[in-house]
Image (spheres, helix red, strand yellow):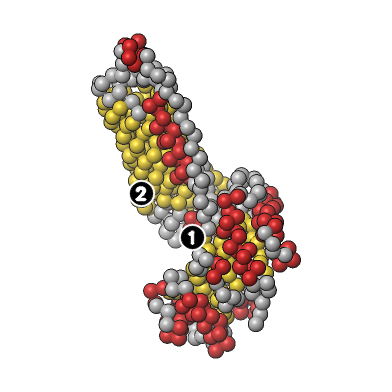
Amino acid sequence: MKLVRAVGALGLAGIAAVSAQAGAADEGYYLGAGIGQSWEKNHHDRITQQLRGSGFSTTSIDDDSRDTAWKLLGGKKFNKNFAVEASYFNLGEFGFTAHTAPPGTLTGKIKLQGVGVDGVGILPLTEKFSAFGKLGLQYAKAQDTFSGTGAVTATNPSPSKSAVGYKTGLGAQYDFTPALGLRGEWENYRVNDAVGNKGNINTLMVGLVYMFGGKAAPRAAEAPPAVLAAAPIAEPVLVIVPIVAKTEQYCSILDIQFEINQKTVQHASEEKMNKVGLFMNKYPKTTAVIEGHTDEVGTASDNMKLSELRAENVVTYLVDRSGIARSRLKAVGYGESRPLGDNRTEEGKRLNRRINAIIACATDIEGIEAVPERITMAMEMEFDTDRAELKPQYRTELRKVVNFMKANPHVTATVEGHTSDQGGTAAQSMKLSQQRAQSVVNAMADMGVERKRLVPEGFGQTRRFAYNTSVEGRQENRRVNIILDFPKQ
């Protein structure tokens, strides 16, 4: 969706052929510089989750999200409508300080600088004034620094990383003379920090551009009579391109527990794993991530090894017993870092000694036999800001779920609503997520599913990890999950 909007901005600049001639040179090289404000938005949930994984709760977070940005640029203008531009930029420094319990702080800072290249579409509006749109690539270096106080320590105090990302921009330019112009522009940089996250840096800059000679555009008075007498040019036609709804689906159908300090698969769990084998054999394009987890009994390093062994043993079982190719299976150990229950109780410890499997589903949900105990569909639905109405383009995928439930009348569904970190209070986000879940339930009921088989739930900004299918999905988390629960046999 974002890339479509960026391309649309360049498409707007591309209708410059119907506009008046510009006063600046039509062709030639130019140099320039700009300075202004940069800003970004810290993802508090990621910071909180990272600290929680280390045993800390977050009491508050202070942001330092604005700085001064500047850049140097040079380009080649091929005609009045198109140029290619290269730049060196410095986006400034941003940071945060998280306050924790037990008492301590974690402070993080990031500096970003790099080079970029853009295609520039130009729209002359008058003899001296023009608008432009940009779309290009940038190569930015992120230099991070982390420090802790009190009970908090930084294990990697100064990571750095260089990576390629895209950039977009819009702006306007006023030419004092055919050679010298004043430019104002907004740009968005998609950057990769040094600790595995992606984010957006925005800038607003003003600057000067100097054109070195080239072929000048004729003024309107100098145009030959044939041009002046030309027939009127038709207004540009607005073309609306429908955007296909995006859906991501996966299955979560394996959840088994282990005895204390045991790594082998119990006989009682074999039936559950055989169901996984049946499902993956029926749909040979599916893959699975087998996650191993432990309680807090023992050291963290020993628990990490134990969780990895548990996951590997499940992979080996599926390979040996069900004939699943090992290339379709990935074993990951998380140790004690992701508890489901309270490790102070025996029941909580039992819940934490577990294996979970996240298994990619076939896209045709209507063809799946009722073999798994439950299927989770993570449907990425775009909602307008602060709105809960279901958009028409998502009804086709929703219809598949409805048809599946009609064919399996004993199956029930829980519809989970989630919001992105769009601002507002936690209570407002929770209410909005509940409204979005209810909107999906209403649509399914209108398509013929009994309401008593549908339960709406809202989770606000909490972003339950078990149902996220990718890093990008966790970052842009406006979605609805539909969990199909099968009756016990």
Residue at 43% from the left image edge and 70% from the top image edge = 285
> Mark 1, residues whose alpha carbon is within 10 Å: few (<14), some, or many (≥20)?
few
Left or right side of 184 for 463: right
Q: Which residue is mark 2?
A: 164
Residue 102 sits in which quadrant? Answer: bottom right
Instruction: Tell me where residue 5 appears, x and y as whole percent.
Output: 48, 41
Examine the rendered structure and indicate whether residue 158 appears above or below residue 336.
Answer: above
C-alpha gap between disc 1 and disc 2: 19 Å
Residue, x 38% and y 29% (percent of image)?
A: 122
Residue 347, given in percent of the width and then of the height, sits at: 65, 78
Q: What residue appears at the point 38 percent right and 26 percent down from the top-left corner? A: 17
Q: Say above or below: 233 vs 287.
A: above
How many residues crowd mark 2 within 10 Å: few (<14), some (14–19), many (20+)?
some
**Quarter the C terminus occupies:** bottom right
Relative to 270, is 440 above or below? above
* Percent of width and height locating residue 157: 42, 56
| Res 473 seen here | yes
Q: Which residue lies at the image location 60% right of the left edge and 55% below the top edge?
A: 395
Name the amino acid, label 1.
Ser
Amino acid at dot 2: Val
Would you name the residue on which mark 1 appears? 470
Farthest residue, direction bottom = 267
Image coordinates of residue 418 in percent, x first then y, are 62, 56
